[in-house]
Image (cartoon, rainbow, N blue to C red):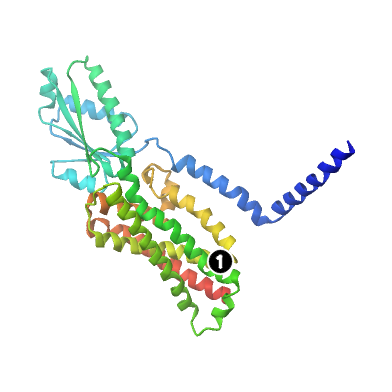
Amino acid sequence: MEALSALIFPILTLIRKELLAIFKDPANRIVLFAPAFVQTLLFGYAASFDLTNVPYAVLDQSHSAASSELLARLDGTGVFRREATLANAHQIALVIDEQRALMVIAIPADFAESLAAGRRAPVQLILDGRNSTTAGSASGYVASVVVAFNAARGGGAGLELVRRAWFNPNLESRWQIVPAMVATLSMLQTLLLAALSVAREREQGTFDQLLVTPLTPLQILVGKAVPSIVVGMLQSTIVLLISLFWFDIPMSGSVWLLYLGLLGFTGASVGIGMSLSSVALNMQQAMLYTFLIIMPLTLLSGLITPVRNMPEVLQVATYANPLRFGVDLVRRVYLEGAGITDIYHDFIPMFVIAALTLPLAAWLFRHRLA
């Protein structure tokens, strides 16, 4: 018994010492519990595959009681929100391209007559394939409404749903994910590189040597930021080449416009990383700060689930996330072939974030020097 106590007591003492070391520091207590709390809430609200708000547009050329009944059934689900009522087929491309509607339901002029005659009455469902997961789920919801509609009319030939997905004809999830990785993967590495740049100097003791050089703090900051931007652009190029030549995902848009957008996005990411680096006292702190924000930035980007399905508070928070606009820009240029007039609104928040974070990093850098 004494031998057993002699074996266990030192272990218990060491465990107590380690626990005290962990929980004594207030910063450690925050790091241990705050990320789990915040990330659980984000996963619960932001990473939901449930459809709660699907904007759609209608081109009803029938204007009949039957078409009104079908649309009333859609509106009555609480899932679909009618965003626009179109007057002609030319307006379909506009609402899809501007992402005002995830899908368009086109009801032909002879819809009611076909139903009354017992013939098949095809209704076209046009889906935005840039978000294949959500589009596929929405298509499933519409199919269930069509089944209920036909059952209420006594079965038979009835309404036939003809689906067509734009920008991603087969609704392949790879087409949704891989192009978005052009922005996402480069941000992960760029953010970490930028965060470690100044912190590494402090930890290795070379920070003081920078102070005696003729360079100003702003020049040092620019010299630290540019390599991270270059590395980020190179990583984006690697992912882009893999997407094009390994996965054979065709690119519809302009390469120079894509790189212009990636330059703005990478600049905003480096600004955030440099701000973290200016605050961190060593490399461990810089890495910790980086990993703390990477997960929320990814969840709130719309990479997997659409931003419009998130709670309004989180939707507002996504405006401070450059990845949201980077993912949207890359997808639209890559899959849709969008031009500068279609995606200029993605540039504005990224430039605002860069314009705020880079001067903030310079100010923090000078403050640390002082």
- Evaluate whether residue 54 shows in this view: no
The amino acid type, in three-letter code, at marker 1 is Val
Which residue, given by chain and number where applicable, does mark 1 sit on?
Answer: 279
In the current view of this chain or complex, which residue is farthest to the bottom?
214
Residue beneath the point at 56% across and 49% down: 35
Q: Quadrant of the C terminus?
A: bottom right
In the rendered image, the vertical position of residue 52 relative to residue 42, given as above or below: above
Relative to the observer, which residue lies in front, 245 or 167? 245
Q: Residue furthest right?
A: 2
At a point 23% along the width and 40% down the height, the residue shown is: 169
Q: Is residue 329 left or right of residue 212?
A: left
Residue 217 position within the rendered picture, expressed as x and y whole percent measured from the top left: 50, 78
Residue 30 visible here = yes
Say above or below: 118 vs 135.
Answer: above
Question: Label 1 crowding class (10 Å Cα cut-off): few <14, some 14-19, many 20+?
Answer: some
Secondary structure under tag 1 reads: helix
Q: Residue 193 in the image: x percent, y percent?
A: 48, 63
- Quadrant of image for the N terminus: top right
Residue 351 vs 209, above or below: the answer is: above
Pick the residue in front: 321 or 111.
321
